[in-house]
Amino acid sequence: MALIVHKYGGTSMGSTDRIKNVAKRVAKWHDAGYQIVVVPSAMSGETNRIIGLAKEIMADPDPRELDMIASTGEQVSVGLLAIALQALGKKAVSYAGWQVPIKTDSSYTKARIASIDDVKVSADLAEGKIVIITGFQGVDELGNITTLGRGGSDTSAVAIAAALKAQECLIYTDVDGVYTTDPRVVSEARKLNTVTFEEMLEMASLGSKVLQIRSVEFAGNYRMPTRVLSSLTDPLMPLAEEIVSGTLISFEEDTNMEQATITGIAFNRDEAKLTVFGVPDKPGIAYQILGPIADANIEVDMIIQNQSVDGKTDFTFTVPRGDYNKAMDVLNASVKEHIGAGNIIGDAKVSKVSVVGVGMRSHVGIASQMFRTLSDEGINIQMISTSEIKISVLIDEKYMELAVRALHKAFELEAA
Ligand code: ASP
Ligand code: MG
């Protein structure tokens, strides 16, 4: 019998009425002959509320204790859902992460899953039970409760689906799928029927926050077909319709459709750029500039080093806007003094816009089409970076939405 994993987000679990709707939907799938494991989030707002309690006592609480607290939201959800299913006459059993167990490392508040035991869950499924497992949490080797980082229930669900060799992992959420770009920026944005996991990785990391990025990595590593779909539809809608709704994150080889050149336009508004002028052009310089930035735990994204003139060059890189001041302080403290560079300047009002698509592998001229579109709009490109399936540009923040709209149109991504 095919096994399907369902994941329900906080909004979908937001009230007892919504939980009853989740139960109806799950029961419908079970009646259709599927084995079902459900992985819910905490009720919406709950994780924030309980973490907030800890922070009322102390600004920077012990991460072990924070996880002890944060993990409880999901424990309430699984119990309520089990009861709601039992009220519909289903056999249902709920488990906390440690009961499965879902073993993780000991990095509290950002733990990584090490293994998932399938023995207990498989036995329950074989007895016709619906199994409900807490998202977001696990247990380390010493028995401490851990959590996987905010939004971590997505990752729990995909990892559980992989461990149990499910046929598909369905992520029910408050949007009905993944779009060509953010519909709040481009009203003509179109829902994608399929997206490859590599494209999804680029779109998620670039700010299309439908799924926790780590869940997409899991889906890719374990080749777990994962579908994003709405939990706000009628829970009793025909299964045949629901099965093909939303957006399927699949694998390139599996999508035998004609590939569009570009799948989506991703963007990240909150970037900042720093430039060190007059850097001596000699071995070790990039390391000397970026080493202290990495030591300060700041993630660097785009990097440019110019061709040198008279043995001196300029070095520019981008960081998340929230880290801009810290990065500037680090540069002023370390770089200037130690490597004898000239001025350091920065701009904290820049944004990144990217065109993404596996179709890029087999089409030439995407970059020039992108640059022409931006040029037609009079938008200056400050930096460029590329990967096999993505071209990103850094531009002034005030042109970001214009750029996204123009590119969306130029690559004909709008709804038909
Ligand atoms: N409840 C956790 C959070 O709010 C995990 C999740 O919802 O995915 O971050
Ligand atoms: Mg979420």
Image: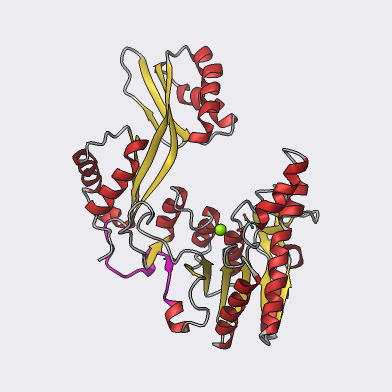
Q: Position of residue 300 (x, y in %)?
A: 48, 35
Q: Quadrant of residue 88?
A: bottom right
Q: Position of residue 371 (x, y in %)?
A: 23, 41
Quarter occupied by the C terminus: bottom left
Q: Position of residue 130 (x, y in %)?
A: 66, 79
Question: Is there any visible trace of residue 118 in the rendered image?
Answer: no
Q: Which one is in front, 405 or 171?
A: 405
Q: Which one is in front, 322 or 262?
A: 322
> Magenta: predominant secondary structure element?
loop
Horizontal arrangement in the rendering, residue 240 relative to residue 403 (left or right): right
Tell me if residue 220 comes above or below residue 340 in the rendering. Answer: below
Residue at point 42% right, 52% down?
203
Q: Magenta stretch containing residue 205, yes or no?
A: no
Tell me if residue 278 comes above or below residue 222 in the rendering. Answer: above
Horizontal arrangement in the rendering, residue 46 relative to residue 326 (left or right): right
Q: Quadrant of residue 212?
A: bottom right
Q: Quadrant of residue 3?
A: bottom right
Task: Count the numbered circles shown.
Answer: 0
Horizontal arrangement in the rendering, residue 69 relative to residue 238 (left or right): right
Quarter occupied by the N terminus: bottom right
Q: Which residues are magenta?
A: 244-261
Q: Magenta stretch containing residue 246, yes or no?
A: yes
Q: Position of residue 187 (x, y in %)?
A: 33, 57
